[in-house]
Each structure stands twice: as structure tokens, then as C-alpha cells.
Image: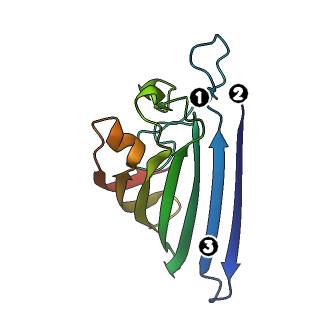
Amino acid sequence: AWTAYGRVERSLALAGRLSIALEAGIASGDGDPDDDDLQTFRAPQPPGRYFGNTTPLGPANLAGFTPSASINLAPRTRLTAQGRFFWRASLDDGIYSPPGILIRTGRRSDKRHVGRELGANMVHEFNRHLSLRAMAAHFNAGTFLRETPPGKDVSMGELLLNFRF
């Protein structure tokens, strides 16, 4: 089992306020679910939201990329927009939740496309201790999820007040 990840980011000369980034990653999946050799990558302690805000996907049998753009709207306010695009790394394996629990077997569909999440968030830092984050995101179920019901889209919004001490 293995995984690979990379990120490139570039700040543009728009008064030092705009940056664009591209992330890409892959986590191996099992090539033969009938043998005893599990080839699916398992993260040791993945966070609850591993790949975005609306998707329940964990880092196993998944390939994807994330383009994003961020701009400082004010000295303490930053807006970020991003898209996350997901495919199964192995067609012989399913998809997993962040703790590594199989949530969809790969035996009921030969489709690779899992889905995409489009979202934006804005963070305002009032001071070094207090910040406010507003987020909205929408996940479109791909052909793999649609063929292994329920393959539903998910939308969410969040308002988070963060206090650091």
C-alpha cells in the first residue's frame, strides 16, 4: 500500500494579494479483493474532513486533484475558492470513509469517477486570538456513486468562530 501527494502554489503580482495552487494525490487501492494481500492504503490517524467539507471520502483507493485560488480582500480577510475532483485508483476496490471503513464496494460498478466538490470560504481574523470563517460547498456525486446508490449530491454551509489561546 502506498500514497503520494504534491502541491504547487504561486503568488501573483496583484499587489501580493492573489495566489493560485494545484494539489494532486493518490492513495492505492486493492487490486484483488479475493486474495489475502490488502493493497489499500490506510492513513494512520486521518482527520474527520480529509478531502473537503462535504465529502465523506477517506485516503484509500482515491486519486484526485484540487485547483484553488485565494485573494486577500483586506489585510485580515482572505477568500478562497477551490474545486476537488475524485476518481477511484483501482476499479477492483471500493471507496472508504476517513477512518478506513469501506462505504461502497467496488464490485457493483466499473466506473472510476467518484465526484467533485466545489466550494469557497472566507476567513476574517479579528486579532491573533479570534477569527471567523464562513464556508459553502457542494459535492456532485460521480458515476461510481450514482451506480451504487444512494448516489446523492450534498450541499453545506458553515459559520465558525474560532478562539485560540
Element under disc 1: loop
Q: Nearer the viewer, residue 165 or 139?
A: 139
Provide residue 111's location: percent of width, then percent of height.
46, 42
The residue indicated by pointer 3 is 20
In the rendered view, would you say 154 is above or below 83? above
The structure residue drawn at horizontal position 40% and vertical position 49%, both measured from the top left corner, is 142
* Alpha carbons under labels 2 and 3: distance apart: 31 Å
- Asked if the residue at tag 3 contacts the one at tag 2, i.e. Cβ–Cβ closer than 8 Å, the answer is no
User: On the picture, is 27 further left or further right than 149?
Assistant: right
The residue indicated by pointer 2 is 1
Tell me which amino acid carries mark 1: Gln
In the rendered view, would you say 38 is above or below 137? above
Is residue 165 visible in this depiction of the protein?
A: no
The structure residue drawn at horizontal position 47% and vertical position 69%, both measured from the top left corner, is 81
The structure residue drawn at horizontal position 47% and vertical position 48%, both measured from the top left corner, is 113
Provide residue 41's location: percent of width, then percent of height.
64, 29
Provide residue 33's location: percent of width, then percent of height.
57, 19
Provide residue 26's location: percent of width, then percent of height.
65, 44
The residue indicated by pointer 1 is 45
Element under disc 2: loop
Q: Mark 2: give few (<14), some (14-19) or many (20+) Cα within 10 Å.
A: some
Tell me which amino acid carries mark 2: Ala
What's the image's color scheme? rainbow
Q: Which quadrant does the N terminus fall into?
A: top right
- Asked if the residue at tag 3 contacts the one at tag 1, i.e. Cβ–Cβ closer than 8 Å, the answer is no
Tell me which amino acid carries mark 3: Ile
> Where, by quadrant of the figure, is residue 12 drawn?
bottom right
- Tag 1 or tag 2, which sits nearer the N-term? 2
* Alpha carbons under labels 2 and 1: distance apart: 16 Å
